[in-house]
Image (tube, grey):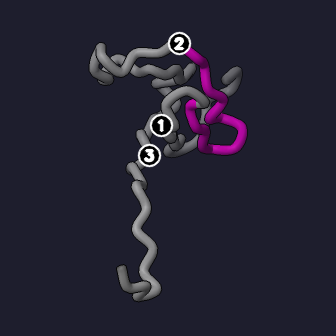
Amino acid sequence: MADDGVTTANVQAAVVVHADDLPVYCPNPGMPLWSSHPRVFLDVAGAGEAMCPYCGTRYRLEGDAKAGH
């Protein structure tokens, strides 16, 4: 296999969430049942992005979080 300098990564687009979606948890309601894992709440309000420690799904906050989140 030739090395052409191009790295192929299995990168999945982040799940975009808004302030109305807080608190964010994974697995989210849109995920298929076969991919279930224990529910984990993710802090996207602090850094604007968080990754699920179980499945690696990235969640990105679009806009600002409301006070209290």
Q: How far apart are marks 1 and 2 (CA)?
A: 13 Å
Q: Which of the 4 image quadrants contains residue 67?
A: top right
Q: What stretch is highlighted in magenta?
A: 39-52
Q: How crowded is mark 2: few (under 14 residues within 10 Å), some or many (20 or more)?
A: few
Mark 3 belongs to which amino acid? Answer: Ala
Residue drawn at point x = 50 percent, y = 41 percent: 58
Mark 2 belongs to which amino acid? Answer: Arg
Work out whether 51 lies above or below 9: above
Which x, y percent locates residue 62? 49, 45
Disc on the earlier residue, 1 or 2: 2
Disc on the earlier residue, 1 or 3: 3
Does 33 sit left or right of 38 as displayed? left
Mark 1 belongs to which amino acid? Answer: Thr
Q: Which of 23 and 51 is in front in this view?
A: 51
Residue drawn at point x = 47 percent, y = 25 percent: 20
* Mark 2 lies on residue: 39
* Mark 3 lies on residue: 14
Residue drawn at point x = 45 percent, y = 73 percent: 7
